[in-house]
Amino acid sequence: MKVVNITFKFSDGTPDEVHPAVEGESVLDVALNNDIKLQHNCGGVCGCSTCHVYIEAGMDDLPEISDKEEDYIDRAVDPRINSRLGCQCVIQGNEDIVVTIPEQDFLGH
C-alpha cells in the first residue's frame, strides 16, 4: 500500500502538521484521525461545503473534481481555483499533498 505525507497548514496561525496517509484515505479522514479539526456536517459524503480546503500542492494526484463537489465548493466561504472538499480528496499514493485549512468558525451548509 502506498503512503504519502499530507502537510496541513492552518489559516489561524497554528503550526503546520505533517501526517502519513495511505492510498484510499481522504484528506478529511487523515485530519480527523490526527485530531485536526475540520468540519464535516454531512459526515463526509459530499453533501455540504464544511470540509472545504485549499490544495497547495499535489492536486494532480487527487481524483478529478466532480460536478457535485464543484456545486458545493461554490457555496463555500472564499472558494478559490485550488478549492476542494476534504472528503473528496482521496489519496492515490503517488505524491505528497499540502493542504491549507481555512477558518472553521462558521456554520456551514
Image: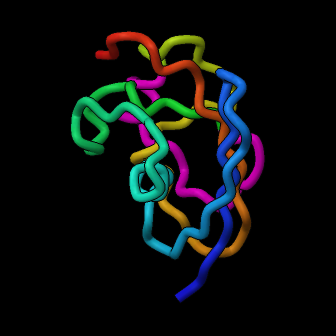
Dividing the picture into quadrants, the one containing residue 81 is top right
Position in image of residue 26 (x %, y %): 45, 57
Q: Which residues are magenta?
A: 55-73
Position in image of residue 10 (x %, y %): 66, 32
Whether residue 100 is visible: yes
Whether residue 59 is visible: no
Q: Is residue 68 magenta?
A: yes
Please say if 104 is above or below 98.
above
Camera-nearest residue between 26 and 81: 26
Camera-nearest residue between 66 and 53: 53
Q: How is the protein colored in the picture?
A: rainbow
Quadrant of the snapshot with the C terminus? top left
Which residue is depicted at the point 42% across and 14% down? 75
Question: Is residue 80 left or right of 50 when viewed as pictured?
Answer: right
- Pick out the residue farthest to the bottom: 1
Which residue is depicted at the point 59% across and 57% down? 62
Please say if 71 is above or below 32.
above
Question: Is residue 94 left or right of 101 when viewed as pictured?
Answer: right
Position in image of residue 67 (x %, y %): 41, 35
Camera-nearest residue between 11 and 51: 11
Q: Is residue 9 magenta?
A: no
Question: Is residue 41 left or right of 92 when viewed as pictured?
Answer: left
Please say if 8 is above or below 69.
below
Which residue is depicted at the point 47% across and 24% down? 73
- Figure label count: 0
Which residue is depicted at the point 68% across and 74% down? 94
Position in image of residue 88 (x %, y %): 43, 48
